[in-house]
Amino acid sequence: MTLYQPFLDYAIATLKERLPDLQDYPIPEGFASKSAIVGKGAHQNEVVTTSYGYQSAKLRQIRAAHVQGGSSLQVLNFVIFPKLHYDLPFFGGDLVTLPGGHLIAIDMQPLFRDDPNYQHQYTKPVLPIFEKYQPDLPWGGDFPAEAQQFFSPAFLWTRPKENALVETHVFNAFKDYLQAYLDFCDRAEPITDVSQLAEIKAAHLRYLRYRAEKDPARGMFNRFYGSEWTEEYIHGFLFDLERKL
Ligand code: DBV
């Protein structure tokens, strides 16, 4: 059972359809697919992590990590990092199924959360989508306070109880957010103002350092694949901006 495969397939097909200049983004040697046998006896399971990377004229890195380890371990982490001369938000999707249940995070993560102009441009248009899903996908509760600054007011954070909710409402929300994100991309114009460019770069680095440092998957990857592989995966692929500068 691979709960998030349809999400991944949809995302890749949509990128190909909407971004005619889409190209592959290099995945470092040894990271395109990684597997390990975990657990003991009857609980033994293969956990396979596959990676996908694309880029386009406006988007520096579009990447996905798909973890498949049976019905109680499924993760799709999908993030879009725009190029540094656009003020586009990040697209962030963290779709997580663990023995404890589902945990869903979908957002257009703002570069400048508290700037009213930025909110007007990049959050306000998403609020109707967010509100549409609130009845079926309500706020998921407990959320790390220090992560809050990286999410928009249209942050969809929910813990659905049923697989069926993931397959329907979460899938639809994912589609709507991704389409709205690509609408933003269509309209984005290059930034040329030097001080604005410096602010964008600082915002990218702030976000990236936080995510690399606090990656909630680090423990899991360490257990499955060891710390050497994990650190290289995090800094060399998942959150690679600093290496690419
Ligand atoms: N999260 C990632 C990557 C993952 C991944 C690259 C490839 O950033 C998976 C895998 N997320 C993942 C897993 C868990 C979470 C949880 C396995 C469960 C960890 C566990 O319970 O052991 C959004 N993801 C979470 C949580 C949040 C997010 C808030 C709960 C963490 C907690 O309660 O402490 N997305 C995540 C996040 C940011 C973001 C923290 C911050 C900017 O964009």
Image (spheres, rainbow, N blue to C red):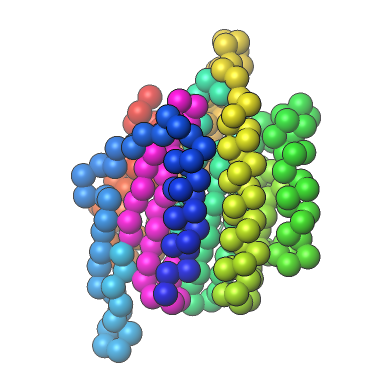
Picture coordinates of residue 16, whole percent (x, y): 44, 41
* The quarter of the displayed image where residue 218 is located: bottom left
Picture coordinates of residue 123, whole percent (x, y): 72, 39
Quarter placement of the C terminus? top left
User: Can I make out residue 57 in this image?
Assistant: yes
Please give the range of residues in magenta: 49-74
Up the image or down, 66 lies above or below 200; here it is: below
Up the image or down, 69 lies above or below 86; here it is: below
User: In the figure, is residue 195 to the left or right of 7?
Assistant: right
Up the image or down, 154 lies above or below 124; here it is: below
Q: Nearer the viewer, residue 90 or 3?
A: 3
Residue depicted at x 25% and y 64%: 35
Q: Main secondary structure of the magenta part?
A: strand
Q: Is residue 50 magenta?
A: yes
Residue depicted at x 48% and y 34%: 19
* The quarter of the displayed image where residue 113 is located: top right
Up the image or down, 99 lies above or below 189; here it is: below
Q: Nearer the viewer, residue 14 or 136?
A: 14
Q: Residue furthest left?
A: 29
Picture coordinates of residue 235, whole percent (x, y): 35, 42
Quarter placement of the N terminus? bottom left
- The number of discs equals 0
Q: Residue furthest bottom?
A: 42
User: In the figure, is residue 214 to the left or right of 226?
Assistant: right
Residue depicted at x 59% and y 29%: 186
* The quarter of the displayed image where residue 179 is located: top right
User: Can I make out residue 231 in this image?
Assistant: no
Residue depicted at x 44% and y 55%: 9
Q: Is residue 66 magenta?
A: yes
Picture coordinates of residue 34, whole percent (x, y): 26, 59
